Image: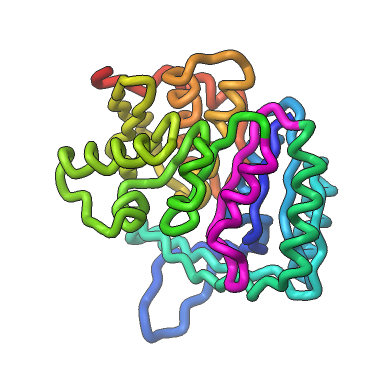
Amino acid sequence: MILAAGLTPAWQQMLLFDGVRLGEVNRAREAHWCSSGKVLNVGLALHHLGGPSLTLALVGGLSGESIDREFLSLGVPHRWVRTPKATRVCTTVLDESSGLTTELVENAAPIEAADIDRFYRAYGEVAARASHVILSGSLPAGAPRSFYRDLLERTSCPVVLDARGPELLEALPLKPWVVKPNREELGKTFDRQLRTDAELKEAVEEAHRLGAEWVVVSHGKSSLRLSGEGRVSILRPATVKTVNPIGCGDCLAAGIAWAARSGMPMLEAVRFGMACSAENAAELLPGRLKLDRVRRRMEEVRVDSS
């Protein structure tokens, strides 16, 4: 079983416009609601790829009930840690005339110590049965910056850690199997701008020195850098017409863990993850992957150098 765990899910509104005019009344052509936020995107992607998975998240309020209903209707295995505070609601604005995607993000409500303790207990129970774990998402106010480190201490299987900043630095000494920041996030983690390939290489090497076994750094649509076991590979993603980019990084993380559990070596697992990301970008709702299409897209992912 692959476990997806995190504290900041979202109930997501998707609004599609023929064109958006700032400062004016804009009427959406379509509106959709769905479960989202990094942890839920990962869980949905794993479920749609197939095979045993479980999503563990903190949910509450009417928005949390909506997430619960959707996961039940889709048959996605889950365990919720219930909180009296409502799960955040976020809005994605898709402007078809410009091709721009605008995210209106509500921060998660501050978390109480009692909710953190209940999450730790639930995590310890389910992580003991996992073959791989994916930890992802920003931390709400009130969560200790050692949160991911604390979870890694409770984990005996390989972990994909999608985090940045202080919480990533805290967790690196626990030697996570894969860390997956994008280029901007990696730069902010080490408080520097990674303008050149040499600066990026230095930051990746620092992540390794601090404990990361593999480092996966994405850079938008252009490339991805995979580093580990003394090797560096540069990969180029499949070309797709992007419908909605939300959740692409989450599908990358899900795909890497799913492929590794299936026996693929790391380079192929990352190619598979990139195909998951491309397939996600081509769909409106995040995480609703189709395995046959992912496999076809994997053939388009190029390894430029290794």
Give the residue displayed 61% in from the left and 66% down from the top.
143
Instruction: Estimate the x, y position of residue 253 in percent, counting from the top left.
Output: 53, 37
Quarter holding residue 99? bottom left
Q: Is residue 167 above or below residue 196?
A: below
Return the residue nearer the eye: 305 or 140.
Answer: 140
Look at the picture and state if 194 lies above or below 24: above
Whether the magenta-drawn stretch holds residue 137 is answered as: yes
Q: Position of residue 13 (x, y in %)?
A: 61, 65
Relative vertical location of residue 165 with respect to residue 154 in this rendering, above or below = below
User: x and y percent of residue 149 in the render?
Assistant: 57, 49
Above/below status of 79 relative to 257: below
| Magenta segment includes 31 | no
Tell me what residue is drawn at x 28 percent, y 38 percent. 222
> For the magenta stretch, what is the residue range?
130-155
* Numbered marks: total: 0
Q: Quadrant of residue 133?
A: top right
Asked if residue 10 lies left or right of residue 211, the reply is right
Specify whether residue 193 is in view.
yes
The C terminus sits in image quarter: top left
Left or right, residue 192 beside residue 207: left
Quadrant assignment for the N terminus? top right
Location of residue 165 (image quadrant): bottom left
Identify which residue, 164 or 4, lies in the foreground. 164
User: Is residue 292 at all visible to an observer of this figure?
Assistant: no
